[in-house]
Amino acid sequence: MVSREPREPMPGRYPVTFGEVDLLRDLDRPSGWVISSGGVPQSYVDLEDPTYLDFEYVRLMADVIDLLDEGPLDAVHVGGCGCTLPRYVAATRPGSRQLVAEPDGGLVQLVRDQLRLKSVPRLKVRILDGRSATAGLHDSSADLLVLDAFSGAVMPLDLATREYMGDVARVLRPDGTLLVNIADGKGLAFARRVLATIGGTFPRMALLADPGVLRGRRFGNLIVAASRTGLPLDGMVRRAAGGLSQARCVHGDDLVRFVAGARPLNDGDPVVIPVPPPAVFG
C-alpha cells in the first residue's frame, strides 16, 4: 500500500453554509492556519503541533482543562470552527471521547478537507446548533462542556440563558466543568448578566481575562469556568498570572462584587449583545 502525505491546505476564500470564510496561512509558523469570517479571526490550528495555542483566550481555557483530574475526558464542544481545543484535548489526554456541535456544515467540510479533521482520534462532529445538540445528549454524560460559539464576533443569545444552562447542567456529571467564552467591551454589562445566569445553576465560578478587558477598557474575551462542586482555583490563579497574557482570575467575594446587581438572562429577554468596534480587528 502506498502511503499518502497529508494534502497541503490551500489558502483562500471559501463559501460555507452561512456565508464565506478566509483560510489564511501563518507566515511566522509554517504549520499554522487561521480561519477568519468577516475579518474576525475565528480559529487558529497548528497542524503539526495541536498543543500550540495562538489565541490568548484559548490558552486560558486549556489551562483550566490541564488542571482537571488526570486521564481521558468525555468532552462536548458547542461551537467547532477549526476544532482547536478538541485537537488539544486529544493530544494531551489520549483516549478522550469528544463531540463537537457546529451548525455550519460547509465549514465542517472545509475543515475536514483542508485542516485534517479526520486525523483527530475519537472525535465526532454533529451539524447542529448548540441548543439542539445539547438537548440530544444523555444525562450526566460529560466531564467537560466548552461553550465557544459565535456568529462573527457575537455570541448567540440562546446559548447564554437560564434555560440553556439548565440543560448544560443535566448533561454534565455532578463534578463536571463548564467553560464559556464571552466577548464584551466597555462596562461589561453583557458579561455580568451571563455570569449571573451561569451562577444560578453552577455555584462555583471563576472569571479569567486580560486586566484591560476586565476593567472594561477594551473589547475582548472573558472565560468563565464553572462547576457545581469546585474548581482548581489555586492552580487557575497561578497559571493566569504566569502565562504569556498575564491574565487575572477573579473568584470568591471579588466575583460576587463584579456580578452584583446583574439580572440573569432568560429565553425571550430583550438584550443588546455587544459588538466590537471596527478597529478591534483592524
Image (spheres, rainbow, N blue to C red):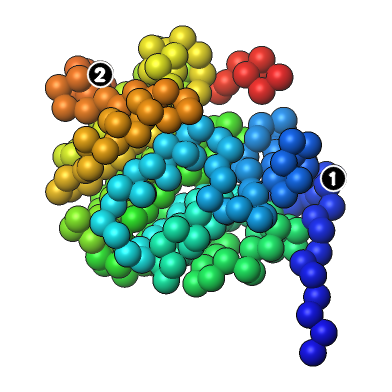
The N terminus lies in quadrant: bottom right
* Left or right, residue 38 beside residue 170: right
Write the residue at 57% across / 21% down.
Answer: 276
Q: Secondary structure at mark 1?
A: strand
- Spatial separation of the CA atoms under disc 1 and disc 2: 43 Å
Circle 2 Cα neighbour tier, 10 Å, few/some/many (<14 / 14–19 / ≥20): some
Write the residue at 62% across / 40% down.
Answer: 42
- The numbered dot on residue 12 is 1
Q: Position of residue 143 (x, y in %)?
A: 30, 60
* Left or right, residue 207 beside residue 244: left
The C terminus lies in quadrant: top right
Q: Residue furthest top?
A: 217
* Left or right, residue 282 beside residue 54: right
Q: Position of residue 161 (x, y in %)?
A: 34, 40
- The numbered dot on residue 258 is 2
Q: Is residue 42 above or below residue 143?
A: above
Q: Position of residue 236 (x, y in %)?
A: 29, 36
* Left or right, residue 137 beside residue 105: left
Identify which residue, 258 or 15, lies in the foreground. 258
Question: In terms of sequence position, does the residue under pointer 1 or pointer 2 come before the other?
Answer: 1
